Amino acid sequence: MSGRVVVGGSFPPKPAFVTVGCEGSGHWEGYTDKRGEFIASLGKSLGSFYVNCSVEATVPGFTRGIATAASNQGDVLITLYPLGRRDESTVALDLAVPVAARKRFEQGVQGLRERKWKSAEASLRKAIAIYPSYAWAWAKLGEALEGSRKPEEAGSAYASAIAIDARLYLAYARWAVIDANQERWDRVAATTDAAIQQNPAEWPILFFYNAVANFNLGRLKEAEQSAGRAVAADQFPRAHYILGHILAARGDYRGAVEHMSKYLELNPHAADAAQVRIEIQDARSRQQLL
């Protein structure tokens, strides 16, 4: 498995610690390189195959990130966000939140850090019962439910968080990833469109998933616009790959070759590198026929 960790809108300030766990006793721990990239070798051979993988990345001073993959033969992208204006350390000081709710919230966050999903869920639900308008508690509840592999319930929790705080972009992003993993592209597009209308300049992951969703829905103009925004952020090598596909679909094979080649330049160990090279050659062949 290969992947990349991005933090606070750029490369990690220091290597991220990454753990990968899959069914069948597949486990790996290690650090990213200076560009935030990692390659996890699970099992005794390169061909070892595991399913239902969970990837976690941490960097001091940033939120913890979790991603899932159907198997260890794919690649993942994890985005962490700086602890700051609206993270769990400051929201707990919100004077509108009752002390009892803040206490339960903090217990829930600690449970998340310790990967005690059920305990975290219980604490966060108690916080919400005390103060139903606690947007961050709803968002963190979504994380706990994701950890327990309850994507539908997690999505509902993120929706509740957004209904309370329309600028809680973390909830949009995590909800979009849940639906993208299930290829619910109409829902991914709707979720990210709602966020993009507010110009979340510091959250390029929302433009990335909006591009993916619109491409899969055949909305090439909208997909190209969002992919361009994601590429401009210089965080997501795969954004070049998506933009390359979009340009190929629009008949711009020269542009497709340029961006798919850039993807491989930025992520030379991508799990799909061989397939991408075939697609690049196909685009070159089509360009020569014009």
Image (tube, helix red, strand yellow):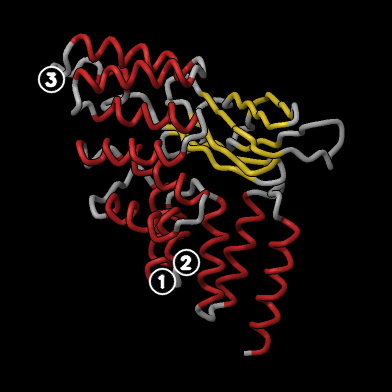
Instruction: Assess disc 3: are there few (<14), some (14-19) or many (≥20) residues with their C-alpha within 10 Å of its C-alpha.
Output: few
SS at badge 3: loop
> Are dots 2 and 1 in contact, CB under 8 Å?
yes
Q: Amino acid at mark 2?
A: Phe
Which residue corresponds to the image point at 65% horizontal and 49% vertical from the top-left? 267
Q: Which residue is mark 3?
A: 96
Horizontal side of residue 87 vs 177, given as left or right: left
Taking depth in this image into account, of 192 and 17 the one nearest to the observer is 192
SS at badge 2: helix
Q: Residue furthest bottom?
A: 290
Q: Amino acid at mark 1?
A: Arg
Whole-angstrom CA distance, mark 1 to mark 3, is: 42 Å
Q: Is residue 156 above or below residue 194?
A: above
Taking depth in this image into account, of 65 and 81 the one nearest to the observer is 65
Mark positioned earlier in the residue sequence (1 or 3): 3
Return the x and y of residue 53 as percentages of the image width and height. Answer: 64, 35
Res 219 label: 1
Number of disc labels: 3
Return the x and y of residue 31 as percentages of the image width and height. Answer: 64, 26
Q: Amino acid at mark 3?
A: Ala
Q: Is residue 241 above or below residue 247?
A: above
Which residue corresponds to the image point at 27% horizontal and 18% vertical from the top-left? 127
Q: Which residue is mark 2?
A: 215
> Are dots 1 and 3 in contact, CB under 8 Å?
no
Mark positioned earlier in the residue sequence (2 or 3): 3
Return the x and y of residue 38 as percentages of the image width and height. Answer: 66, 35
Return the x and y of residue 283 as percentages of the image width and height. Answer: 65, 75
Horizontal side of residue 47 vs 282, given as left or right: right
SS at badge 1: loop
